[in-house]
Image (spheres, rainbow, N blue to C red):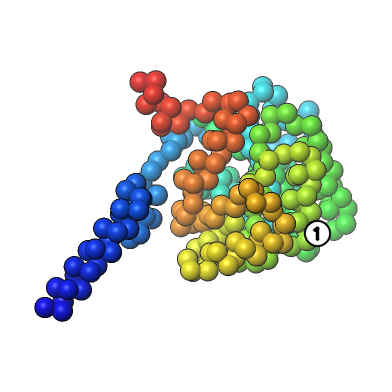
Amino acid sequence: MSNNKNKSTAKKLKQKKMKKDPNRPYPYTRKVVEEEKEIIRIKSAEITMSAVNRSQYPNESIPEIALAGRSNVGKSSLINGLLNRKSFARTSQTPGKTRTINFYLINEEFYFVDLPGYGYAKVSKSEKDKWGEIMERYLSDREELCSILLLVDVRHEPTDDDKMMYDWIKHFGYNCIVVATKADKIARGNYQKHISIIRKKLELQGDDKIILTSSSKKIGINKLWEEIISQYNNKGYEITTLETKEDTE
Ligand SMILES: Nc1nc2c(ncn2[C@@H]2O[C@H](COP(=O)(O)OP(=O)(O)OP(=O)(O)O)[C@@H](O)[C@H]2O)c(=O)[nH]1
Ligand SMILES: [Mg+2]
């Protein structure tokens, strides 16, 4: 008898939750639903250039989104995660050694730009200066650049370098989406606490977004794709997604 009662209470609770928002999946199925929703089909991905100087940047007016962040934060891994490929973008054996700007052309429609990482302790002063020059050259007046993803490790408070990078992005007038990486390393219950720490250190404004991801466990990847596509759309670039394809079929 009491067992039945429990069952019916659970059923009522479930119905109550469903009633609130019929489109919202019951909590136990939320993760599965997110992972099932494919947003874009990757038909082609190629590295077109490892650039240092402006003359080496692509110049066909194809839009791009760049990934910035500390060395080892997971920029190249995130590109691989977004493309669903294991080792397309080179992940570092030696942190801090990527000293070029890598342009990856996706579906012949847009670029992902893998920027050199910063903050690696064993880098000499002259190498740091070189990093600054490469970055400044790229960030000043890059018309194709629609938005920058600033990656921070979800486990740690952002460093002063991260804060400087965020301010730099804003100073140059670009949109910034903060991506908290390696979410598989913390418990789901702690997500909010870590996000608040990041928000506070970077001094994000209310409408600045933080997206939590894990490249290895495929957390937040589709959500990030949605954001990337809306960044391109906001700048007036159409990107072929599975949804836009259906519309034209
Ligand atoms: N657990 C976990 N490890 C990750 C994740 N993403 C990246 N890593 C690991 O973090 C290390 C650095 O990743 P990279 O993608 O090479 O980092 P990066 O930011 O490109 O580094 P630089 O090229 O030196 O600037 C690698 O050992 C990855 O396997 C993740 O989502 N979860
Ligand atoms: Mg890298």
Relative image position of residue 177 (x, y in whole percent) = 63, 46
43 vs 7, nearest the viewer: 7
Secondary structure category for the residue under label 1:
loop
Mark 1 burial class by Cα count in 10 Å: few <14, some 14-19, many 20+: few
Residue 237 coordinates in the image, percent (x, y): 58, 26
How many labels sit on residues?
A: 1
* Residue at 30%, 54% in the rendered image: 18
| Residue identifier under label 1 | 123
| 21, above or below 191, in the image | above
Q: Quadrant of residue 108?
A: top right
Determine the image quadrant of residue 59: top right
**Residue 10, visible in the rendered structure:** yes
In which quadrant will I find the C terminus? top left
The correct choice, above or below, for 234 with respect to 192 in the image is above
- The reply, left or right, for residue 204 in relation to residue 79 is right
Q: Position of residue 143 (x, y in %)?
A: 73, 28
Q: Quadrant of the N terminus?
A: bottom left
Q: Position of residue 43 (x, y in %)?
A: 45, 31
Q: Residue furthest bottom?
A: 2
Above or below 129: residue 238: above
